[in-house]
Image (cartoon, rainbow, N blue to C red):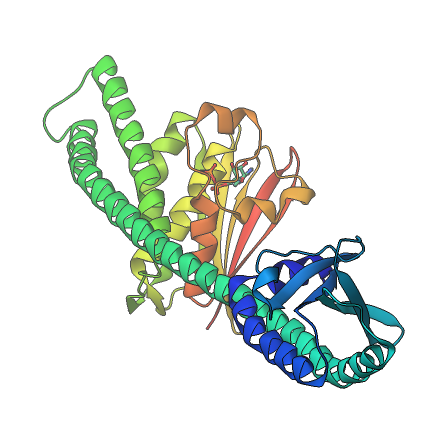
Amino acid sequence: MNNNLLTTAYFNEENLKDSDKFYLDCFLKLKKEFNFSYCAFFYKTQGKYILSHKHFFDEEFSNYTPEINKKDSFNKLKIPIKMQNSTIGYFLFVKKEIFIKQEKEKAKKACLEISYIVKDFEISKIFQNQLSILQNAILEKNLATKKLEEQNEKLIETDKIRSEFLANVSHELRTPLNSIIGFSTALKDEMLGGLNEKQKNYTNKILTSAIHLTGLINDILDMTKIEAKGMKLNLGNYFPSDIIKEAINIIEPLANEKNIKIEFFDDYKSEFLIDYQKFKQVIYNLLGNAIKFSYENSKVIIKIYKKENNLFIKIQDFGIGIDKKNHNKIFEKFVQLDNIYTKKYSSTGLGLTITKEFVKMLGGEISLKSELNKGTIFILKFKI
Ligand code: ADP
């Protein structure tokens, strides 16, 4: 029992009001039994007896305030109220005349009788106080829960606004970037006339930067949609090899920049039920990383084949590789390992998180084999 809590709560206004009635009743009953001019009840709290209630029956005592153990000009009779062996309080009776033996005995007897209800009353007050403390605690908890709920709602709302904002901004940026990619591709392919070496070089730079920037924006947009659970599958029957070829076409300018050859081994000539855009994005992300984390003048191999009832796609590079301890970590949001390439290329660290999420949505699995400085193989597996 927390004594401090109890005693503080005990003397609160509500309880004192109830106590007033109770003790007045006691004093009146006692007054019927024997004679006194003034009486008081002292209650023990925190080791001290303090004046709990008083009442006078004689006008002369209207301003009288006794102290329990101090002598004064009046006569006092002090009767303890005991619970088991300890004293919980005292009744104090005062009058001008001396208390005679008979009176003292009557007082003791009357107090003994009344002490039972006093004890009950005090105990029930303790329980009542405990109950009100508990009720307050519950009330406070409920208030805190309500506040949390409100904050949560606000957070959800803020998150929605943030997602919408990101989606809008990304969309606004993507549209002009698509034009840049389209026009610079047309320029690079000399559809608008021949280019000299310098012009070709600059056109390539515009194209690769725009592709890179589109990748970043797509990552943010996709992550926003995934988090908002707003990503839907758009399934259809496609030749996965066609989708892979398209991803290779898009990424080729980046590979050319580092003189990296992309070799595609196509051993699956059937259709497959898949979400075209998401599958393309997965291949694009993995090819993008394979190129990004490879040394110049190397190669990237992509294979597609069927084994038992599974379709496998393997993307292999011979680049810097990934330490075993980081094989799980790289799929986490915003994780970028510290190496020369992550410093060189600006990126979001969202690519593999989105890739893994998409593969999961498509019902597949992604795993990797990698060793530092030897290269990396990402393996996709789909049930056929
Ligand atoms: P980022 O946008 O940085 O490429 P990703 O989520 O795609 O983010 O990849 C997370 C990290 O995993 C990269 O920063 C890189 O350190 C490591 N990583 C991913 N793919 C490869 C790879 N093929 N070879 C070496 N490291 C890789």
Q: Quadrant of the N terminus?
A: bottom right
In the displayed structure image, the side of residue 322 where residue 183 appears, left or right: left
Residue 139, placed above or below residue 152:
below
The quarter holding residue 34 reads bottom right
In the displayed structure image, the side of residue 183 where residue 217 appears, left or right: right
Count of numbered badges drawn on the protein: 0
Q: Residue at x 42, y 51 (%)?
A: 354
In the displayed structure image, the side of residue 270 where residue 113 appears, left or right: right
Of residues 309 and 267, which is closer to you in this image?
309
The quarter holding residue 10 reads bottom right
Most extreme residue toward the front, as rendered? 97
Residue 107, placed above or below residue 328:
below
Most extreme residue toward the right, as rendered? 85
Instruction: Where is residue 156? Give x, y as percent.
Output: 34, 55
Of residues 153 and 219, which is closer to you in this image?
153
Of residues 327 and 318, which is closer to you in this image?
327
Q: Residue at x 53, y 48 (%)?
A: 331
Q: Residue at x 44, y 62 (%)?
A: 143
Q: Is residue 93 visible?
A: yes
Residue 342, placed above or below residue 201:
below
Instruction: Where is residue 365? Give x, y as percent.
Output: 52, 62
In the displayed structure image, the side of residue 243 where residue 266 appears, left or right: right
Of residues 117 and 367, which is closer to you in this image?
117
